[in-house]
Image (tube, grey):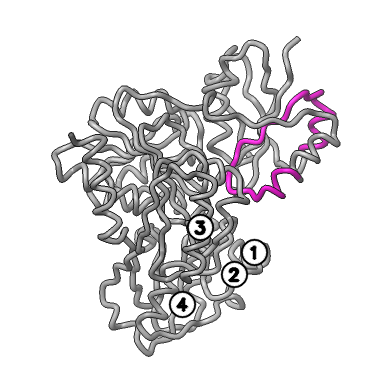
Amino acid sequence: MKKRVIISGAGGRDFHNYLIYFRNDPHCEVVAFTATQIPGIEKRSFPKELTREKKKDIPIYPEAKLAELITKLHVDYVYLSYSDQSHQQVMAFASRVLAAGANFGLLGTKDTYVPSKKPVIAVCAVRTGSGKSQTSRALAELFRKTGKKVVGIRHSMPYGKLLDETCQRFAHERDFKKFKTTIEEEEEYQPWLDHGFVIYAGFDYKAIVRQAEQEADVLIFDGGNNDLPFLKPDLHIVVADPHRAGHELTYYPGFVNFLLADIIIINKVDSAQKKDVELIAQHAQKYNPHAKIILARSELVVKNHGLIKGKKCLVVGDGPTLSHGGMSFGAGSIAVKRYGGTFVDPRKYAVGSIKKTFEDFPHLTYEVPAMGYGKKQVEDLATTINNVPCDVVVDGTPANLKRVMTFKRLVIEVGYELGHKAVRELEKVLKKKFLK
């Protein structure tokens, strides 16, 4: 008899796991998905056109209904298929599954990697917001300097109509409109476009790799959250964040990345405490002694930073990093401190879904999380920002927020790039392995 399976995910890894593993396994029948983390994604179904038998859509339910579904659908196995969970959270989830009468499972790299004919460098992390994308862009620039054509492949974020999002290619901002992207997606794609690179996304990674290979000499997998690579890497780089020292051992699947890494980049050493940097280095030497350790600065890029001094500043930061990523500040806050501004507390001015985000994540204080998973949430974000009595808005998100909303006050954009010394260390590695 077929094993009846629920895949519990957050709109990305879950669909990848289905297409790569479960769809091809005649001994398993996926009877449902559950969804969490991302607002509204449970109001969809997985299209029958993408299933093995092509007879009916697979329903998607809120994760809160999981125990009820296990009984109702006679489920044998539940596979956890999303990332950035503490080990405590993973085992709490597993315990609820076991108590409801099903078995609990995780898929490993052997069953979920997609191979490529081209060299693949995977850039992953131990927590979301560690600095993966700036590392990915630095690598892409190094290859471009030698005449190699680089294409980025981003971790899955299909938050809209699934049949339209199996394989997405972004080369211009107009592609955002074509694929009806959210702010969260644009935060990841915009910096690649700003640097003149093409970036792919979607969730059918076999199709994505086949298409990307046609225009690239090298593929760079730009990971999401702290997830494992979807592509089989020839070089696995993992970024650790000393502002959350210790998390490299206690979060799933970030610790798996930490164990697998060929290179561990300890980022943000310019803004972190020395003892926290040293703790991660000690953990690397203990748990992955063969990995090369690179210390990296996360260099701020701020135009018109003189306009921050003495001003009341509202800081807007990356939504996922500030919410389930657990950070209370990002590049925008560092810029305000460095250039002499003062913070305005935005919480009492928040409305709608942004107000609820502050309630759900009480560690947040002086940064507005740029949550924008739908039109209404973007409106709530714009209203919240414009409600705050400040002199300037310091935008620490990678997205171009001015493209999707109108601001009543001056906006100062804050970017960040990997420090020059770390880039030189990466260049040495690439010359030995890829640029001979």
Residue for point 41% across, 64% down: 268
Magenta region: 66-91
- On the image, the x and y values in percent for residue 193 come to 28, 48
Q: How much space separates mark 2 and mark 4, taking CA atoms? A: 13 Å
- On the image, the x and y values in percent for residue 435 come to 19, 36
Amino acid type, residue under disc 2 in the picture: Leu
Tell me, for residue 364, which label it has, or none: 2
Amino acid type, residue under disc 4 in the picture: Leu
Nearer mark to the viewer, of 3 and 2: 3
CB within 8 Å, label 1 to label 2: yes
Residue highlighted by disc 4:
314
Q: Secondary structure at mark 3?
A: helix
Nearer mark to the viewer, of 1 and 3: 3
Quadrant position of the C terminus in the picture: top left
- In the image, 240 versus 388, the foreground residue is 240
Amino acid type, residue under disc 3 in the picture: Ile
In the rendered picture of this protein, how many numbered marks are placed on residues?
Answer: 4
The residue carrying pointer 2 sits among few (fewer than 14), some (14 to 19) or many (20 or more) residues within 10 Å by Cα, namely some
CB within 8 Å, label 1 to label 3: no
- In the image, 28 versus 183, the foreground residue is 28
